[in-house]
Amino acid sequence: MIDAAAAVSASTLVVAAADPVIAVAARKFEFVPSEIKVRKGRPVTLALTSSDFVHGFSMPDFAIRKDLVPGRTIEVTITPATSGRYPFLCDNFCGEGHDGMSGILVVTDD
């Protein structure tokens, strides 16, 4: 598993391993990492956690919607078929900084 805690100093995580599991931590008012780069056609699993609140995880372009309950890990596996930039966001109101709680999945051809 790729550890989100290790990515705290860098807001972008580039994934090169085959079938990786990427830890994504939600906390008021951010996702860590907030940018994840993956390759088109390669499956990737997001291991989603929350440490402080029941955050929502929504990735509309992939029809993904999950509640992130503190103390639990929710795994979501996707295989991006098209390169591009795909936003994800918290959709459970978590306070005044909620509007900025988002990230981006960047899918590249190479």
Image (tube, rainbow, N blue to C red):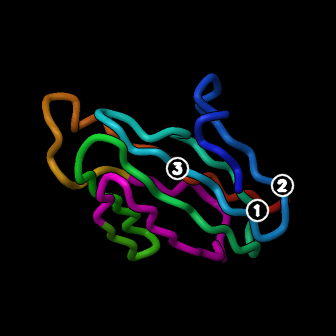
Above or below for 44 versus 24:
below
Quadrant in the picture for the C terminus: bottom right
- Residue flagged by tag 3: what amino acid is it? Val
Mark 3: few/some/many CA within 10 Å (<14, 14-19, 20+): many
Magenta segment includes 79: yes
In the image, 46: left or right of 66?
A: right
Camera-near label (2 vs 1) is 2
- In the rendered structure, are the residues bearing label 1 and label 3 in contact, judged by CB atoms less than 8 Å apart? no
Which mark, residue 16?
Answer: 2
Residue at (62% x, 48% y) in the render: 36
Disc 3 or 2, which lies upstream in sequence? 2
Above or below for 9 versus 101:
above
Q: Position of residue 38 (x, y in %)?
A: 71, 57
Quadrant in the picture for the N terminus: bottom right
- In the rendered structure, are the residues bearing label 2 and label 1 in contact, judged by CB atoms less than 8 Å apart? yes
Q: CA distance from mark 3 to mark 2?
A: 16 Å
Magenta part of the protein: which range? 67-88
- Residue flagged by tag 2: what amino acid is it? Ala
Depth check: give the residue in front, 107 or 27.
27
Residue at (37% x, 48% y) in the render: 50
Which mark, residue 24?
Answer: 3
Depth check: give the residue in front, 92 or 81.
92
Mark 1: few/some/many CA within 10 Å (<14, 14-19, 20+): many
Camera-near label (3 vs 2) is 3
Magenta segment includes 69: yes
Mark 2: few/some/many CA within 10 Å (<14, 14-19, 20+): few
- Give the residue pinned by disc 1: 39
Q: Position of residue 31 (x, y in %)?
A: 44, 41
Camera-near label (1 vs 3) is 3
Disc 2 or 1, which lies upstream in sequence? 2
Q: Position of residue 33 (x, y in %)?
A: 55, 40
